[in-house]
Amino acid sequence: MTDQQQASYSRQPISDDLRRWVDEQLAAGHTVAALRSSMREAGWMPDAIDAALGTEVLAETAMPAGRPSQPTTAMPGPAMEGAPTLIDAGDRQVRVQLTMRHPRVVVFGDLLSDEECDALIDGARERLARSLTVETKTGGEALNVDRTSDGMFFTRGENAVVQRIEARIARLLNWPVEYGEGLQILRYAPGAQYRPHYDYFDPAEPGTPTILRRGGQRLATLVIYLQAPAQGGGTTFPDVGLEVAPCRGTGVFFSYERPDPATRTLHGGAPVLAGEKWVATKWLREREFN
Ligand code: PD2
Ligand code: ZN
């Protein structure tokens, strides 16, 4: 789209019919995130969408500051207005290294210190087991041939380092700590990989309703590199030809407004060719996850 086209979309008048359509969709229980997504696909620019939604709807769906347990229909993500190069994450300034709009991807530098990376690795090492993935067929967990790493989960707030990192992520991504799953740690030995997959739970699978009872859908993922291998192990987004090279302390954030391949959030962990790769993954849910 050219700048001129973009400008003309942004000035697109908001008709009464469109406002009525927005009201009807909200009354039918569709989320603001889903409306935004449909409107984006129909060619509307973000500012025109905001105008159509109206300030009352936007105010209602913004994250309720100081009331982290309130449900919200906004999306997790950093505040990118003004194209900041540094974002204040509370106790640390995080660098913005790469952004992409569709899929929504942001790569953050200096997210964790070397000491924090080591503390997570040291706390996880003795507790590693061959990784399981959530089985949407049954709602349980199973060994998955597509994922050859070893893993474990910290419970949320399990220790002081985990707590500090979770508070930083919540501030950076404007999403309550309580809506996040516990941090998952993965170790990839040479040859290990995580084949391309989606992180949301497939609505067509019979086990998904059971999984969603606890916290609703996943809306976003943050993969943080704790140790970079000597070769390989990038995080790939095959739909858009993007590969993020692992770098200690760096995080890759991506979000998905709908559990749908149209979000282009297919992603994988490329095979590690030499050395060991360690990551921490934080998944963000629609609601409080307990
Ligand atoms: O380790 C990775 O690069 C990776 C890639 C894809 C991790 C995940 N997915 C995940 O933890 O979901
Ligand atoms: Zn994943």
Image: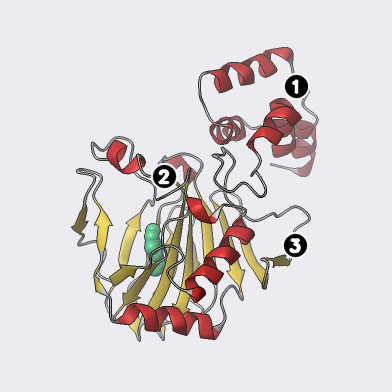
Assign a secondary structure to mark 1.
loop
- Residue type beneath disc 3: Pro
Look at the image and tell me in which quarter the N terminus lies: top right
In the picture of the structure, the residue carrying the numbered disc 3 is: 84
Earlier-in-chain disc, 3 versus 1: 1
Q: Is residue 34 left or right of residue 96?
A: left
Query: Cα distance, mark 2 to mark 1?
Result: 35 Å
Disc 2, ligand 1: is the CB inside 8 Å?
Answer: no
Q: Which residue is mark 1?
A: 14
Q: Left of 142 or right of it: where is 90?
A: right
| Residue in view at x 56 percent, y 41 percent | 70
Q: Which secondary structure lies at badge 3?
A: loop
Mark 1 closeness class: few <14, some 14–19, many ≥20 residues within 10 Å: few
Image coords of residue 51 (percent x, y)? 75, 29
**Residue 205 visible in rendering:** yes
User: Does ligand 2 reach within 8 Å of label 1's beta carbon?
Assistant: no
Kind of residue indicated by mark 1: Ile
Q: Is residue 166 left or right of residue 123?
A: right
- In the picture of the structure, the residue carrying the numbered disc 2 is 215
| Coordinates of residue 145 in the picture (x, y in percent) | 20, 62
> Callout 3: few (<14), some (14-19), or many (20+) C-alpha neighbours within 10 Å?
few
The mark nearer the N terminus, 3 or 2, is 3
Q: Where is 196 relative to 15, above or below?
A: below
Nearest to the eye among marks 2 and 1: give it: 2
Give the colour scheme shown: secondary structure
**Disc 3 from disc 1: Cα separation:** 30 Å
In 3D space, how far apart are the residues under numbered discs 3 and 2 (Cα atoms)?
Answer: 31 Å
> Mark 3 or 2, which is nearer the eye?
2
The residue drawn where x is 35% and y is 44% is 201
